[in-house]
Image: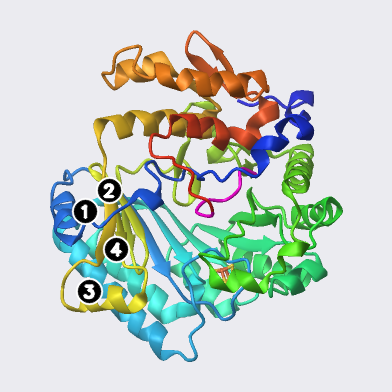
Amino acid sequence: MIKHGEEELAHVAVGTVSKYLSERIPRYTSYPTAPHFSAAVGATLYRSWLRALPEDARLSLYLHVPFCRSLCWYCGCHTRVPGHRDPIDRYMAILEREIALVSELAGGRRVVHAHWGGGTPTIVGPSAFLAVMSLLRERFAVEPGAEIAVEIDPRRLDVAMASALASGGVTRASIGIQTFDARVQRAVNRVQTLEATQACVDRLRGAGITALNVDLLYGLPHQTVESCETTVAAALGLAPARFSVFGYAHVPAMKRHQRMIEAAALPDGEERLRQEQAIGDALVRAGYVRIGLDHYARPEDALVQAQTRGGLRRNFQGYTDDPADALIGLGASSIGELPQGYVQNASGVRDWARSIEKGEFATVRGIAITREDRLRADIIERLMCDLRADIPSILHRHGFPPGFLDAERSGLDTLAADGLVRAERGIITVPESARTLVRRIACVFDAYLRPEEGRHAVAV
Ligand code: SF4
């Protein structure tokens, strides 16, 4: 368990690490990371991977809804704003067909976790949501204690939808706040008052959904340390169980709507680091425990318990205690993870729909995982989750000789000289003060990483 006290508030000096702040590094929600997926993995291979899932495999489901009522300029998700209701209804009908297709090969297996992401999943409305939930229960063995999570845009959640979420079995809601600074909100096209957010929280709790997460962002245009602190203070008043704190990733070459954001108004790397530290410090002072890189949870939360027993995991939704053996992605652009590798559906709704309507999977990219990928993924996941990796024992567990990763040593030596990492008898530890830069340490073990300017978010 992470100690409370002075060490938690200690930070690596901004000046010492400034050379790392503008480096573009993956978030390591998977390894190999998504830019290394290729067309070598398609629908046929996915079909065979699904068919090979053991009968007792526990499943996690991810359902993607790529629609929103309006577009936030900072958004990095696959989403769009439909002009009317029809595309949403069509999408949900095809999503049901995709669930049926998957269930022909992997149905009946236990589901321990389901996550509705987007986009704004609640845009589908009560009846479409409940229809999909009951189809999932019909085709899979959704466990009574399964966590069913949904991402919420608090500006759009009415009482009827909150109550539908509860009757569909939703146990956790992630509420997007990002910032309460009105100037920043205007600059990113997302105006959201504290009052509207509080009303949403009340609706969810009133419906019986009490496990609440709050998402905050730093590094937005015009954002300052002070405005981050004011936002955290207001968000703490909502008393969520967990916080996620992400840095805005400005990649306008990949996300065209981000061109609406004035680049000159964006904080630089050092200011981003200060904002991240200010938010983290405020949450720790309020009694939340740091989880991995960017999550915070109350001491009694399941994520803290998972971290304590070394059972914390990292997947496309961030940090989790999800024990599933496979993740099934449903919907356009969704990613799945099977024991053999990763698969991703076509990102465009039309392409995805065309395949599913023909009775075929919409898998267009992916990667088959090698034995060495598994080894490196294990090291990277332990670093991202525990800030520690016992390299000799991980090598042994995966059947590799002790000297297999000797070439990585020089990369670690440079980081050690800057105080970002300690290495003793092969056990790598990231000091609490360098937690924010853990991705920089993890990337030493990434065999795929090449300088790919613009593909990944900056290091902080
Ligand atoms: S509501 Fe969420 S998914 Fe939709 S545009 Fe805004 S940030 Fe993106």
Quadrant of residue 295 in the image? Answer: top right
The kind of secondary structure element at disc 1 is loop
Foreground of the two, 397 or 58: 397
Question: Which residue is identified by label 2?
Answer: 367
> Distance of mark 1 from mark 3, alpha carbons?
20 Å
Q: Is residue 453 above or below residue 253?
A: above
User: Quick check: marks 1 and 4 in contact, CB under 8 Å?
Assistant: no
The percent position of residue 383, horizontal first and vertical second, equals 51, 29
In the picture, the disc for residue 40 is 1
- Of circles 1 and 3, which is in front? 1
The kind of secondary structure element at disc 3 is helix
The kind of secondary structure element at disc 4 is helix
* Highlighted magenta segment, given as a residue range: 454-460
Residue farthest to the top? Answer: 425
- The amino acid pointed to by label 4 is Arg
Question: Which residue is identified by label 3?
Answer: 356
Of label 2 and label 3, which has the lower sequence position? 3
What residue is rendered at 73% in x and 67% in y? 198
User: Quick check: marks 1 and 2 in contact, CB under 8 Å?
Assistant: yes
The residue carrying pointer 2 sits among few (fewer than 14), some (14 to 19) or many (20 or more) residues within 10 Å by Cα, namely many
- Of circles 2 and 3, which is in front? 2
> Distance of mark 1 from mark 2, alpha carbons?
7 Å
Q: Quadrant of the N terminus?
A: top right
The residue carrying pointer 4 sits among few (fewer than 14), some (14 to 19) or many (20 or more) residues within 10 Å by Cα, namely some
Q: How is the image coloured?
A: rainbow
The percent position of residue 110, horizontal first and vertical second, equals 27, 50
- The amino acid pointed to by label 2 is Ile
